[in-house]
Image (cartoon, rainbow, N blue to C red):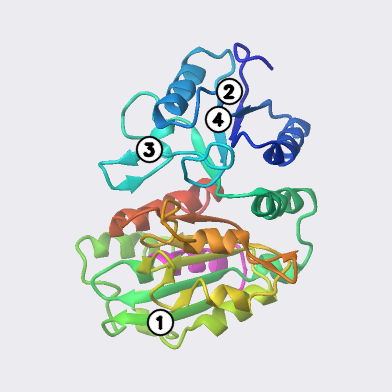
Amino acid sequence: PTDEQGAEYLIIRGSSATYAPWADSIKNWRVRQGITTMVKTVDEVGGNTVTAIESYLNNAYNTWTTPPAACLLIGDYGTDGTVNIMSPIWNNYCVSDNIFADVDNDQMPDIVMARITANNAAQLATMASKGLNYERNPPTSAYFYSHPITALGWQTERWFQICSETVGGYFLNVQGKTPVRINEIYSGTPGSVWSTATNTSTVVNYFGPSGLNYIPSAPSTLGGWSGGNATMINNALNAGAFILQHRDHGGETGWGEPDYTNTSINGLTNTDLSFIFSINCLTGKYNWSNECFTEKFHRYTYNNVNSGALGLLGASEVSYSFVNDTYVWGVFDNMWPDFMP
């Protein structure tokens, strides 16, 4: 399609010719799915600057006959437009491609944004092939789909424990799956109350026995709040799990509780890849000077075979705790509309 005609799915890639085959492979697959798709290099959209890319996206959204509903950026954060793509910085500290997608300046994205944070053709081959292989030949193991993983760090004054356990409770009680729970304590003692935070009663009434019944009235009923570690996480991922939902504190190189870091990822041997919801601070900081946690997970291979994560959701900066919890509930309700009927 031409620029005037537009496309539902827009791919913007680094200008290196080595990126073209994978960008075209993704495009061709989307077209076969019935999704009009267009590929542009950063040079073709005006250059590897925030101003040029945002102007191009704004114009596309406002003037194309078919405006982009989603945009994939192929390239890690950086100034070298052959292999990298720049990103806006919110309030002088927080990197976010969602700013590109905020066409009407209401602080909310109007286009779904994603980024493959490749620095070279080899990384791109791994990351792009993970998604394409999964869509073309999804895992067939029944165990893989029946054992989602929930992991969290208990903190009495936060909602970490409510957030992940409601997801697990939904899969257990509504979908009949067998969630694998891997938990550790950050602070506090699990007992008769889920949290001391404001509005906890509202949330527990909604998700608890008087509401959707995803969680019991008292966390002590569940047990299993401590002892979670990296070995348990790797064992669960290697056994097979279509998703892992984590909620706790985080940093550029991993999770606080259960303790799981870039180094821990090296213990993975899975070839059925899991989607990782890394809902915490900083694990998705793709403009960091080194390889952040989500990048390591997405780029990971074992014995030169794709392993680790299919894809990830992760915060690029320090994030807002209770907003994160409600964000998770919204994400899961969007994918499974009966999660919050």
Q: Are marks 2 and 4 in contact (CB under 8 Å)?
A: yes
The image quarter in which residue 307 lies: bottom right
The image quarter in which residue 91 lies: top left
Q: Which mark is residue 184?
A: 1
Q: Nearer the viewer, mark 4 or mark 3?
A: 4
Measure the alpha-carbon separation of dots 1 and 4.
44 Å
Residue where numbered disc 2 is placed: 44
Residue 198 painted magenta: no
Measure the alpha-carbon separation of dots 2 and 3.
19 Å
User: Tag 2, which secondary structure?
Assistant: loop
- Please provide percent x and percent y for residue 254: 44, 69
The answer to whether 190 is drawn above or below residue 88 in the figure is: below
Q: Which mark is residue 42?
A: 4
Q: Nearer the viewer, mark 1 or mark 2?
A: 2
Residue at position x 26%, y 72% from top?
195
Amino acid carrying label 4: it is Val
Residue where numbered disc 3 is placed: 88
Q: Nearer the viewer, mark 1 or mark 3?
A: 3
The answer to whether 158 is drawn above or below residue 121 in the figure is: below
**As rendered, which of 266 and 9 lies closer to the eye?**
266
Amino acid carrying label 2: it is Glu
Measure the alpha-carbon separation of dots 2 and 4.
5 Å
**As rendered, which of 170 and 265 lies closer to the eye?**
265
- The answer to whether residue 174 is seen in the rendering is no
Amino acid carrying label 3: it is Pro
Q: Are marks 4 and 3 in contact (CB under 8 Å)?
A: no
Q: Where does the magenta region start and end? A: 163-178
| Horizontal side, residue 199 vs residue 316: left or right | left
Amino acid carrying label 1: it is Glu
Badge 2 crowding class, 10 Å Cα cut-off, few under 14, some 14 to 19, many 20 or more, is some
